[in-house]
């Protein structure tokens, strides 16, 4: 699954346990902008929570590595 650079960066920080406000500070985005990215990621991965999203993100990354 193709992610934008910002979606990937948000997802990486989310996987590290960062909260929305921490992600916003790290990426110099607004907290509402981060929430919009996370909501888009929930829809893209068909997940409903942060743990499910983190697991799906890692599965997606590993699937891409195995394809080469």
Image: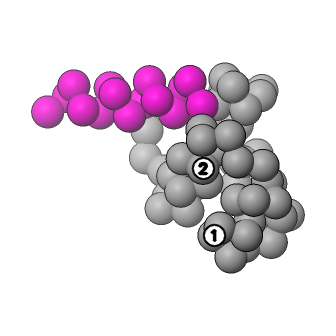
Which mark is on residue 36? none
* Whether residue 67 can be seen here: yes
- Look at 21% across and 25% down and name the residue there: 66
- Look at 54% across and 47% down and name the residue there: 12
In this orientation, which residue lies closer to the viewer: 19 or 56?
Answer: 19
- Pointer 1 residue: 27
Looking at marks 2 and 1 on the same chain, the residue that comes earlier in the sequence is marked by 2
Q: Quadrant of residue 34?
A: bottom right
- Look at 82% across and 60% down and name the residue there: 21
- Report the span colored magenta: 54-68
Q: Quadrant of residue 15?
A: top right
Q: Position of residue 49 (x, y in %)?
A: 77, 28
> Going by the picture, which residue comes out furthest to the left?
68
- Pointer 2 residue: 13
In this orientation, which residue lies closer to the viewer: 3 or 59?
Answer: 59
> Going by the picture, which residue comes out furthest to the right?
32
Q: Position of residue 57 (x, y in %)?
A: 51, 33
Identify whether 57 is placed above or below 40: above
- Quadrant location of the N terminus? top left
Q: Position of residue 30 (x, y in %)?
A: 80, 72
**What is the count of numbered marks?**
2
Alpha carbon distance from label 2 to label 1: 10 Å
Secondary structure under badge 1? helix
């Amino acid at each position: 699954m193709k992610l934008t650079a910002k979606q990937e960066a948000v997802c990486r920080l989310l996987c590290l346990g960062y909260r929305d406000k921490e992600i916003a500070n790290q990426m110099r985005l607004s907290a509402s902008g981060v929430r919009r990215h996370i909501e888009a990621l929930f829809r893209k991965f068909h997940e409903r929570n942060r743990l499910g999203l983190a697991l799906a993100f890692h599965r997606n990354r590993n699937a891409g590595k195995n394809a080469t």
